[in-house]
Image (cartoon, helix red, strand yellow):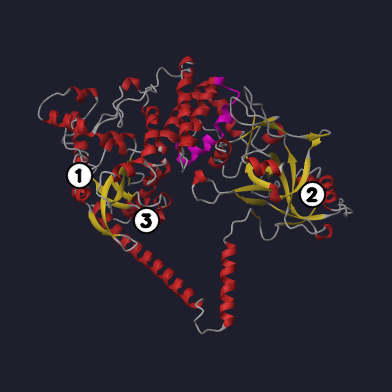
C-alpha cells in the first residue's frame, strides 16, 4: 500500500517524523442460521496497510481483527417509506461510536512502541473501505442508482467520460443545509440521502469517497463478466450450443469441467467465475461476430490486468486501452437487440479502477473475498458455539477467548524460534569448547537444509508407479505409436554406436510431472507450478466406472538460443506429452527422465480476433511427428482449445477433442501467469 500516492500525499500533511497507520475497514452482512431462521450478523473488520498484503490475505495470519457487530434490526415500528432511512442512520451512528477514538488520534497522533523497539508518533487514518456496491452507497450517503465515487448522472453511467468526484466538504455542507430545513440543489442532483451525521464527518485526513476500493469479486467476476457478458453471449449463441461447447472443452489440471454446461448452474462461486473466464474466449470464438469477440476479449483482458498483484505504468495503460476498446465496440449488443443501454453501475465503476490503483496500490490487497472468508471464523463458527439466544454477546466472548489462544500460540511460536536461533548461535560459536565432530555435523546439516530449499525445475515421484511396461502396452494404452523410432533417433544423437531399442524392452513410467515455474513479478512471491499428466485409461471394474486416458500438452524449448534471448513464448513449441519414463541403464546413463512427445506446428503470428496462436498437429508421412526429449526441456504446461466453428461437431467430447479437432487455440487465459508472460514480455 505504501507504493500508492495516497500514502505520500497524506505524509506531507503530517508533522516531520510522523508515522501513518492506514486503516482498512471491511463490513458485510452474513447469514448465521442455516435451513431455517433469519438470524444475521454484520461484522466490521480492521486491518492495517502497514502489513504486507500477502499476510493480510491469509486468515491463518490473524492480521485482521473484529471491531464489533453492527445491529441488524427489522425496524417494524417504522413505515415502509422511512424504514430504510432509519436503518441507514443506525448504521452511521454505530460506526461513529466504533470509530470515535480515531478523531483525536488522527489529529494529534498516538505514541506507540513499534516492533523494532522504537517509539513513534503514529497517526491512525482511515485509508480504504472494502465493501460491495450497496454498502458503498450506504457509506457515501447516496442513493443506489448513483455512483459512490463521483456525481455522474444516472442516465450517463454507460458513458466512458469521467465525471467530477464527490467532495467531502461540499457533501457535508449540503447535508447541514438539508438538516436546517433548506432544499439545496445538490441534494437532489447528486442523489444524497438525508443522513445528517455520517460517521466519517469528523475523521481527519479522510476522503471517504476515495476510500472505496474496486470489488474484484462482485464487480468483475460476478457482475461485469457473469451477470452481463456471459448473459449477453448466451442470448446470441443459445443455451444449448454454449452448453455443448463447455461440455466438450479439453481438460487441464485445475480446470473445472462443466459436464452439464453452465445454463443449469444456479449457485456460483468466485472460483467458478474465474474458471469460466479461462476458456470463455475459446468457447465463443467462431460463433459470434468479430465485434462481439472484440468486446469479450477486451473484457477478459481488463479483468486479468485488474487483478495483477503488481501494477506498472505499462499495465495501467493496457487497462485503460481495454476499457476504451470495450466502450468503442459495446454498441454491437444494442445492434443485436440484446441491450437497450449500458447505464449499469458495475460497468461505470470500472472508470474508477485507475485512480484507486494509483492511490492505494493493486486491487488484490482489497478483494472482498477476504472479509467473506473471515465470516467463517468471526461469525459463523462463533454463532454455532452459542445457544442461539442473545448470541451476539456469546459470540463476542467466545471470540475473545479464541483470540487469547491465538496470541498465546503466536508467542510460543516466536519464543521457540528465538530459542532455536540462540541454540544454533551457541553451537556455531568457535569459542564454544565442544567436540569438533559435533561442529562438523552441524555444518553439514545446515548446508543440507539450505540446498533443500533451492527450487528445482521439475518434480517426479521417488519411484515410478508403472514398472516394467512393455512397448506394446505403450502403443496400445498410451498411443505411443512412434516410440521405438523416436527413441532410436534420440540414442543415435547421443552415442556413436548405441544399443538400439526393440519391441521386447521394458520401461518404468511416471504418471505425472510437476514443473516449477519461474517467479512472476506480477503475481507476487508465490511459487507456482504446473502439473502435466500422462495417465493411461482405466478400465471399468465392478461398480467402479472406468476413466479415460489423460495426456496433457506442454510448451517445449525448441530453440534454446531464441528462448533465452527473447523470453515469453519465443523459441517454444507445443507438444502433447504421452509418456514420461526412465531410460534403462543398458542404453546408457541419463541424468533426467525422458518424455515421448507428439509435436504441434510452430507458433506463428497471433490471431487478430482472439489474440491467441492457432496451431494444429504436426505430421510426418501422415504419422504424428514424435520425438524423445529430456524433461528439462519442458518449460510449462499449456492448454489447447479446439476450434468449434459456427456450431460444434456432433460427437466431440472433452475426452476426444484433442484427437478430433483440426485446429487449436493456445489458451493464454488459462492462468494469469501465462497471460502476463505473453502480453507483458
* Magenta span of residues: 266-290
> Dot 1 corresponds to which residue?
96
Is residue 564 among the parts visible in the rendering?
yes
> Dot 2 corresponds to which residue?
473
Residue 200, horizontal then vertical, whole percent = 22, 40
On the rendered image, what quadrant is the C terminus found in? top right
**Residue 74 left/right relative to 591:** left
Disc number at residue 62?
A: 3
Q: CA distance from mark 3 to mark 1?
A: 25 Å
For the point 50% across and 45% down, which residue is it?
523
**Residue 126 left/right relative to 470:** left
Mark count:
3
Residue 176, horizontal then vertical, whole percent = 14, 32
Q: Residues within 10 Å of mark 2 (few under 14, many from 20)?
A: few
For the point 25% across and 47% down, which residue is it?
14
Q: CA distance from mark 2 to mark 1?
A: 73 Å
> Residue furthest toward the right?
497
Is residue 554 among the parts visible in the rendering?
no
Residue 188, horizontal then vertical, whole percent = 21, 23
For the point 49% across and 16% down, which residue is it?
336
Residue 136 location, quadrant: top left
Q: Secondary structure at mark 3?
A: loop
Dots 3, 2 in contact, CB < 8 A? no
Of the numbered discs 3 and 2, the one sitting upstream in the chain is 3
Amino acid at each position: 500500500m505504501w507504493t500508492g500516492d495516497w500514502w505520500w500525499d497524506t505524509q506531507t500533511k503530517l508533522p516531520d517524523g510522523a508515522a501513518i497507520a492506514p486503516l482498512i475497514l471491511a463490513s458485510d452482512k452474513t447469514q448465521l442460521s442455516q435451513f431455517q431462521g433469519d438470524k444475521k450478523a454484520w461484522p466490521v473488520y480492521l486491518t492495517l496497510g502497514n502489513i504486507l498484503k500477502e499476510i493480510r490475505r491469509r486468515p491463518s495470519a490473524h492480521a485482521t481483527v473484529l471491531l464489533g457487530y453492527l445491529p441488524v434490526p427489522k425496524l417494524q415500528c417504522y413505515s415502509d417509506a422511512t424504514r430504510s432511512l432509519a436503518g441507514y442512520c443506525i448504521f452511521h451512528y454505530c460506526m461513529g461510536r466504533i470509530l470515535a477514538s480515531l478523531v483525536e488520534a488522527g489529529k494529534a497522533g498516538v505514541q506507540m512502541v513499534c516492533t523494532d523497539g522504537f517509539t513513534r508518533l503514529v497517526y491512525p487514518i482511515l485509508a480504504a473501505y472494502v465493501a460491495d456496491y450497496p454498502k458503498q452507497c450506504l457509506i457515501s450517503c447516496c442513493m443506489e442508482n448513483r455512483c459512490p465515487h463521483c456525481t455522474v448522472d444516472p442516465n450517463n453511467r454507460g458513458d466512458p467520460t469521467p465525471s467530477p468526484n464527490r467532495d467531502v466538504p461540499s457533501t457535508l455542507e449540503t447535508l447541514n443545509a438539508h438538516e436546517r430545513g433548506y432544499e439545496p440543489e445538490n441534494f437532489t442532483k447528486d442523489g444524497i440521502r438525508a443522513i445528517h451525521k455520517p460517521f466519517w464527518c469528523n475523521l481527519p485526513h479522510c476522503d471517504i469517497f476515495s476510500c472505496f476500493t474496486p470489488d474484484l469479486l462482485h464487480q468483475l467476476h460476478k457482475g461485469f463478466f457473469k451477470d452481463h457478458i456471459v448473459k449477453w453471449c448466451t442470448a446470441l449463441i443459445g443455451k444449448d450450443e454454449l452448453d455443448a461447447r463447455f461440455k466438450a472443452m479439453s481438460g487441464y489440471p485445475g480446470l473445472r469441467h462443466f459436464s452439464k454446461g453452465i445454463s443449469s448452474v444456479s449457485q456460483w462461486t468466485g472460483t467458478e467465475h474465474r474458471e469460466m473466464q479461462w476458456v470463455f474466449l475459446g468457447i465463443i470464438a467462431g460463433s459470434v461476430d468479430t465485434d462481439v469477440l472484440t468486446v469479450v476479449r477486451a473484457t477478459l483482458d481488463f479483468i486479468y490486468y485488474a487483478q495483477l498483484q503488481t501494477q506498472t505504468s505499462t499495465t495501467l495503460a493496457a487497462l485503460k486501452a481495454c476499457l476504451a476498446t470495450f466502450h468503442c465496440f459495446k454498441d454491437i449488443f444494442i445492434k443485436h437487440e440484446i441491450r437497450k443501454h449500458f447505464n449499469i453501475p458495475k460497468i461505470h465503476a470500472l472508470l474508477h479502477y485507475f485512480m484507486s490503483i494509483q492511490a492505494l496500490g493493486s486491487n488484490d490487497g482489497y478483494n472482498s473475498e477476504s472479509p467473506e472468508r473471515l465470516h467463517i471464523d468471526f461469525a459463523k463458527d462463533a454463532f454455532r458455539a452459542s445457544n442461539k439466544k442473545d448470541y451476539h454477546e456469546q459470540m463476542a466472548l467466545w471470540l475473545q477467548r479464541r483470540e487469547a489462544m491465538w496470541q498465546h500460540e503466536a508467542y510460543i511460536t516466536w519464543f521457540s524460534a528465538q530459542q532455536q536461533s540462540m541454540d544454533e548461535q551457541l553451537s556455531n560459536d568457535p569459542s564454544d569448547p565442544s567436540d569438533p565432530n559435533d561442529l562438523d555435523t552441524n555444518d553439514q546439516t545446515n548446508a543440507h537444509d539450505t540446498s533443500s530449499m533451492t527450487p528445482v525445475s521439475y518434480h517426479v515421484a521417488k519411484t515410478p508407479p508403472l514398472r516394467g511396461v512393455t512397448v506394446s502396452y505403450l502403443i496400445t494404452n498410451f498411443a505411443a505409436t512412434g516410440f521405438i523410432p523416436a527413441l532410436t533417433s534420440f540414442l543415435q544423437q547421443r552415442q556413436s554406436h548405441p544399443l538400439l531399442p526393440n519391441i521386447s524392452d521394458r520401461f518404468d513410467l511416471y504418471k505425472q510431472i510437476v514443473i516449477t515455474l519461474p517467479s512472476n513479478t506480477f503475481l507476487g512471491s508465490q511459487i507456482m507450478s504446473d502439473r502435466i499428466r500422462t495417465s493411461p485409461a482405466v478400465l471399468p471394474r465392478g461398480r467402479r466406472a472406468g476413466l479415460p486416458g489423460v495426456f496433457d500438452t506442454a510448451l517445449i524449448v525448441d530453440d534454446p538460443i531464441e528462448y533465452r534471448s527473447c523470453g515469453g513464448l519465443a523459441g517454444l513449441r507445443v507438444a502433447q506429452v504421452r509418456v514420461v519414463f526412465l531410460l534403462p541403464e543398458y542404453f546408457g546413463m541419463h541424468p533426467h527422465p525422458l518424455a515421448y512427445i507428439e509435436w504441434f506446428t510452430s507458433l506463428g503470428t497471433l490471431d487478430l480476433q482472439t489474440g491467441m496462436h492457432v496451431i494444429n498437429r504436426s505430421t510426418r508421412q501422415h504419422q504424428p511427428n514424435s520425438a524423445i526429449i529430456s524433461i528439462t526441456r519442458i518449460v510449462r504446461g499449456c492448454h489447447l482449445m479446439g476450434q468449434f466453428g459456427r456450431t460444434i461437431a456432433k460427437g466431440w467430447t472433452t475426452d476426444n477433442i484433442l484427437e478430433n479437432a483440426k485446429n487449436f487455440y493456445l489458451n493464454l487465459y488459462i492462468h494469469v501467469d501465462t497471460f502476463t508472460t505473453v502480453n507483458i514480455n
